[in-house]
Image (cartoon, grey):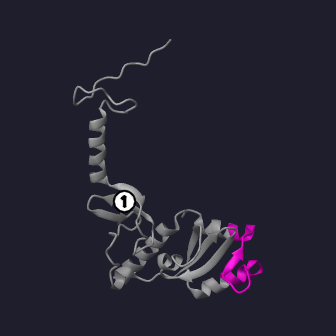
Amino acid sequence: MSSAAPQGACALCDAPQHPGAPLALCLNHLLEAHEWVEDAYGVTDVLPSPCAFCGSRLGVRYPSGWLCAVCEWRVGEPPPPGPAASRVDVVYYLRYRDRIKIGTTANPAQRFSALPHDEVLAFERGDRTLEQRRHAAFATLRIPGTEWFETDERLLTHVAALRDGHPDPWALLARWRSEEAARAV
């Protein structure tokens, strides 16, 4: 019969070290350290609502509030007027079940709130002209009277090429907006 190795004492007090802890700390001191890390470095989590500036759903929660993890915009503050809120039109690819929507917008977060979708697949910088070219390129897959397309290997290959090197469409949009704002000043 084997017995487990005895746990040592907490490095800061006489309490037993918490089982499995990577540091010689008791549970109370581990929790204090955890709270300090949360306060100092924040906790990455899903934002309560999409970022008003870039539309990302990923945020960092601090005791003082939330920041967008993509563009670092403070949640609850409206986007700035003028150059910092530069318009960037995108052609978007949304997946809902086994179909893909190809559309265009300058405000994806707002647009997507009105559309059923399971996943944002990709963004491509462009306006209605590019959207119409994409609709024509995949016309044989188009569901009549809609901007929804059947999924096939050609369309998936196109989406994969757009995502190559840019797996997070929201981060790419934030970069485009940042570049546009820099050009405007």
Looking at the image, is 20 positioned above or below residue 4?
Answer: below
Residue 172 image position (x, y, % from top left) = 49, 69
Q: Identify residue for label 1.
A: 60
- Residue 154 drawn in magenta: yes
Residue 79 relative to residue 152: left or right: left
Looking at the image, is 88 positioned above or below residue 96?
Answer: below
- Residue 60 drawn in magenta: no
Residue 107 relative to residue 152: left or right: left
Say which quarter of the image contains residue 130: bottom right
Q: Residue at x 27, y 37 (%)?
A: 28
Location of the C terminus by quadrant is bottom left
Q: Please report the bounds of the magenta region as a residue range.
A: 134-156
Residue 162 image position (x, y, % from top left) = 60, 69
Q: Residue furthest top?
A: 1
Towards the viewer: 172 or 143: 143
Towards the viewer: 17 or 138: 17
Say which quarter of the image contains residue 153: bottom right
Q: Residue at x 31, y 53 (%)?
A: 41
